[in-house]
Image (cartoon, grey):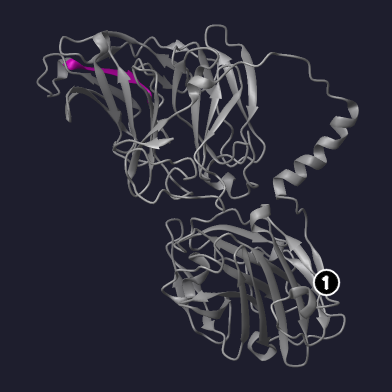
Amino acid sequence: MVVGGDLCQDDFSGVGPGGRLYLATTPGWAFDLTTVTFFERVGAGEYKVRAQLSYDSGGKTFYWADENGDGQRQDAEVTTAPGHIRVSGWYMFIGPDLTLYSDKRQFKVTGWTACGAPKYDLAHPVPMPEPACGSADGRFALTTGAYSANNSWMTCYDVASGKALWRYPDTFVGVHGSHNAPPPEVGLVRGSYGPCGFGKLPDPIGNFWVLATNVGEWHIITEGGFYLTRLFQGDPMKTEYPEQAIPGASLDNCPPGVGGEDFGGSITLAKDGKLYLQAGKTAFWNVEVVGLETVKALKGGTIQVTAEDVQKAPSFKAQYQTGGTAGVQAMTAKKMTPTFTGDLDADFKGCQVIQYQKMEEAAARSAAAYDAQNLYLAWDVKDGTPWVNGASEIEMIYLHGDTVDFQLATDPSAAAGRNEAVAGDLRLSIGNFKGKPTAVLYRKVSGEKHPKEFSSGVMKSYVMDSVTTVEGAKIEVKKGAKGYVVEAAIPLAVLGLKPADGLKLKGDFGVTHGDPSGTRTRLRSYWSNQHTGIVDDAVFELMMEPKNWGTIQF
């Protein structure tokens, strides 16, 4: 994929009679979708309003088609229909021939006004078997999975007969579903918003849908039910932006924006058969997809699924869904005083070393020990751009790149299944703050008050009772080309921890990985808590979830 020019957000391009070009737009935000405006492109950078579809809170739809070309809405040019004919959600379900899709209805263009506005018979739509996005030729309809569902399906129907033709896994659907998604795999659709556009190419591709997602990648599915290709890079450890934002730059290893919550985008299949994407976030890119002309059909055959295969399937499914780590974990912290040399295995010799990862390039190992004065913690982390963190405020270090993390419930009597942190629960984040390894201690509930308010787009106010920099901590960091080791001695008095032989407490180890510039955390991996997929919300990335912690026995 290579960069072209710029388009605007939430747009769609269509073609009318004689090759006339049209642009449909919404106001530009996913929840402000009461109006879709149709423009005709009459010259370079010049567009004229031709029509508008809108609906009101009273349950009525209005469609204005300009008859005289004055661009003004006259009563005689407006038709109405009961109910809401909504063609725009995350994206617009409008075909390249300007066919509209709304719920279980297909509205084809029935004619054109003298100035070129499309006309529709709103009272007599073509019925469809399910609420769906149609295909470019109007023959097929594709449904998507249930929002937030972890195990769901997209299904393709034949519009004329209503027959279901095939289905394909649509997993971890939408923004919230993607928070539980595993690492990227070829053919795995994670966090889909549904089709951001559709078109038709010569055989063997035919009709296709482009699925945009919440996790840095888009996908193309064909009318035959085949997964054709991934677009953009969904692996945050492999993200690589071009050095210059110029036409011709390759975007193969970029996400469609910054890698999460990249809302918006559309596709256009040009007259020359080339596929273009509109993507981006703080800026919008016009991207050409190259290589589709090389797609070839493979000779069919037979695949045999045995009873043994069926028995193995659940274990594979569980492994893929959790990135290889399933269930609440348990580990031991040994009583000893380690020496810090940067060699975890030698320094913590005899201690249990735990391993966890969401992907091989970001694998981590950790160990714990204690003596009468300190709790000793160690992390050995794989990272292609090691120990980079761009936080300008120390309390935001968890949000801006590489950190190591330790969470602990110092009160063994606290309810084990609690959803939220209580008194005694703490989070320790260690990162490279302005060139110095620094530890920050977060307590949601604390008798000692050092409050800090956090906010995000979802939660406007979230207050931690105490956020402090740990004084008296000894932290050693050994950095290599492909990773780093952090070893830390944290005074027990700072933590309010009194270890004793046989004591069992709930806790967790983790790491965060940032983008190469240290601008934003893009991956969170933890030993026990697997509900760590969200990386675009400052509050939810901070929250502790004790119910998902493992057990640490001293």
Point out the residue furthest to the front here. 481
The amino acid type found where label 1 is placed reads Gln
Location of mark 1 (residue): 352
Residue at 41% x, 73% y is 392
Residue 420 lies in quadrant: bottom right
Residue 136, quarter of the rendered image: top left
Relative vertical location of residue 416 with respect to residue 110 in this rendering, above or below: below
- Residue 83 drawn in magenta: yes
Element marked by disc 1: loop
Give above or below for 51 relative to 444. Answer: above
Tell me if I can see residue 88 in this picture: no
The image quadrant that residue 73 belongs to is top left
* Span colored in magenta: 77-84
The percent coordinates of residue 234 (x first, y second) are: 55, 44
Q: What is the quadrant of the C terminus in the image?
A: bottom right
Q: Residue at x 62, y 65 (%)?
A: 483
In the rendered image, the quadrant that contains the N terminus is: top left
* Nearest the eye: 112 or 203: 203
Residue situated furthest right in the rendering: 308
- Residue 472 falls left or right of residue 336: left
Determine if residue 238 is in view.
Answer: yes
Task: Name the residue rendered at 11%, 17% in the picture.
Answer: 69
* 199 displayed left or right of 498: left
Residue toward you, 379 or 325: 379
Our reading of the magenta stretch's main secondary structure is strand
Query: Does 464 appear above or below 258?
Result: below
What percent of the width, then of the height, locates residue 189?
A: 59, 36
Total numbered labels placed on residues in the image: 1
- Whether residue 517 sits left or right of residue 484 in the image: it is left
